[in-house]
Image: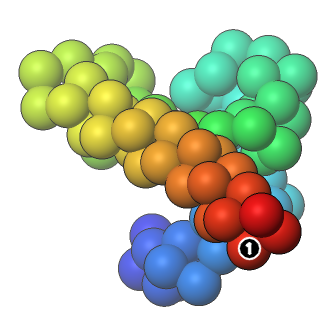
Amino acid sequence: MPCFVAVLALLSPRLAIFVMFLFTDVLSDSMGNWWMPLIGFFILPWTTLAWAFMWWVNDGRVEGLGFFVVILAFLIDLASWFGGHRARSERYA
C-alpha cells in the first residue's frame, strides 16, 4: 500500500490523500482529528502527506529528519501557491 500511495502522490497529492483516507487510518491517527486532514487536502496537500508519512515511518512521532521532510513539503506547497499566482499574473498582464 505505501508504494501505491507514493505513486499516486507523484501524480496528485490530493488523490493520494483521498486513497489514504479511504483505505488506512494513518491520516486520522497522525493528525488526531478529522478537520486537519481536510484543511490539508485543500490548502497544504504535500505537507499533509509528508506529516502522515513521517508519522507512520517513525512509529507515531515526527522528529529529526522527519521535520526536515515536512518543512521541505511545506516549502513545495508555498511554491505551488505563489508560483501559480505569479504565472497567472504574468499570463494576464
Occupied quadrant, residue 48: top right
Disc 1 secondary structure class: helix
Q: Is residue 78 above or below residue 20?
A: above
Q: Which residue is mark 1?
A: 91
**Residue 42 or residue 56, whichever sits in front:** 42
Q: Position of residue 61 (x, y in %)?
A: 33, 19
Occupied quadrant, residue 92: bottom right
Which residue corresponds to the image point at 85% horizontal and 35% vertical from the top-left?
38
Q: Is residue 23 above or below residue 25?
A: below
**Residue 90 or residue 34, whichever sits in front:** 90
Q: Is residue 33 above or below residue 23?
A: above
Side of 69 where 38 appears, left or right: right
Side of 54 where 63 appears, left or right: left
**Residue density around tag 1, few if under 14, some if 14–19, many if 20 or more, within 10 Å:** few
Q: Position of residue 66 (x, y in %)?
A: 23, 32
Q: Is residue 64 visible?
A: yes
Side of 61 where 64 appears, left or right: left
**Residue 8 or residue 20, whichever sits in front:** 8
The C terminus: image quadrant:
bottom right
Which residue corresponds to the image point at 64% horizontal and 21% vertical from the top-left?
31
Q: Is residue 24 visible?
A: no
Occupied quadrant, residue 54: top left
Amino acid type of the residue tagged 1 in the rendering: Arg
Q: Is residue 24 above or below residue 32?
A: below
Which residue corresponds to the image point at 57% horizontal and 26% vertical from the top-left?
30
Q: Position of residue 3 (x, y in %)?
A: 41, 79
Side of 50 where 34 appears, left or right: right
- Give the farthest residue toward the front: 93
